[in-house]
Image: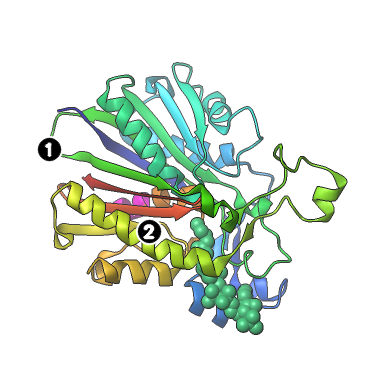
Amino acid sequence: MLRGRIISTGSFLPENVVTNYDLERIVETSDDWITERTGIKERRVVNNGQTASDLAYEASRIALKRAGLKPRDIDLIIVATVSGDMPFPSTACFLQKKLGAKNAAAFDLNAACSGFIYGLHVASGLIKSRMHKRILLVGSEVISKFTDWQDRTTCILFGDGAGAVIIEGTQEKRGIYSTHIDSDGNLSELITLPGGGSMHPPSADSIANRLHFIKMNGNETFKVAVRTLTEIAHRTLEANNIEASRISLLIPHQANIRIIQATAKRLNLPIEKVFINIHKYGNTSAASIPIALDEAFQTGRIKDGDYILLEAFGGGLTWASSLIRW
Ligand code: COA
């Protein structure tokens, strides 16, 4: 049986660090409050006009180099993002141009913070069906440009960054064992970026009403996140007939340390088996899982044969999970 396998990873974080103490000078908040409620200590924020395709390019270059591949070896580029360079063309096309990946087709995927696992779902299906041979999947976000730096309930949460993986087919007993995706459009109001689309096109009013910034009902999102993540993670384990105790590492979307802890507890996974880097980067949306995956692999937390469980949720609402055997 042919299945997709991640053969290489790469990530890129902008240099500029914004700490909770920096935010104390912008909005009425405190390092204590942010740390206790979210687990975040600092995040990266671009400060030199870098775009989502710039960050995606850096992460992709590293993943290609580690795989010993040239950009022309890639036949599909998928970029998961909600903070792309422009509404169109796609950030994936800008990335293709920057890489010189002339043999690839390229498109963006919008599933907000679940975008990377949604991308894994699409990529693994295209590999299994032999429609593509080698896919570059990137999560890249410059969320800081859509963050309302006057809104203390959201500006403390997000950060910029990018992570990339290269996926090929394998007949071996490893790779992407399964992917599971879900959404509920009835909960679309919980996290939005209302302005700039056909509902609220850019206008003097949309700017005056701050519609071009992220809006979120954090409390409600929190509750739905824990419930849906637990359910989809259990479903993923069942689909593969595997006990949670055999998972070597859970790599959750890094949105809030309390969501991460609550989900791990409900899965009966000790916190030592959970990869956490939220304190350094905050919520980097679609980039959070590929950045974490890259860091986990580079720091020796993932070894050949390990079962890795991924899970994410985000605007839509969307949520998703995947079991990988490394
Ligand atoms: N600093 C200090 N106080 C803050 C604050 C900040 N940055 N943000 C909110 N507060 C205040 C609120 O105004 C409220 O004050 P009040 O009790 O006087 O009204 C109080 O803190 C509690 O607010 P609440 O919203 O209940 O806090 P919370 O414990 O739910 O934490 C979030 C807020 C946003 C951190 C939390 O709900 C969360 O992380 N939700 C999930 C969001 C998420 O992950 N979104 C991304 C999806 S991919």
Q: Amino acid at mark 1?
A: Lys
Check contact, mark 1 vs mark 2: CB within 8 A: no
Image quarter for ligand 1: bottom right
Question: Marks 1 and 2, how far apart in space?
Answer: 29 Å
- Judge whether residue 65 can be spotted in this image: no
Quadrant placement of the N terminus: top left
Residue at which label 1 appears: 173
Q: Which residues are magenta?
A: 293-298
Q: Residue at x 64, y 64 (%)?
A: 155
The residue sitting at the front extreme is 186
Nearest to the observer: residue 198 or residue 57: 198
Q: Quadrant of residue 97?
A: top right
Residue at which label 2 appears: 228
Q: Amino acid at mark 2?
A: Thr
Kind of element beneath mark 2 = helix
- Judge whether residue 258 can be spotted in this image: yes
Q: Quadrant of residue 78?
A: top left
Q: Position of residue 53 (x, y in %)?
A: 57, 36
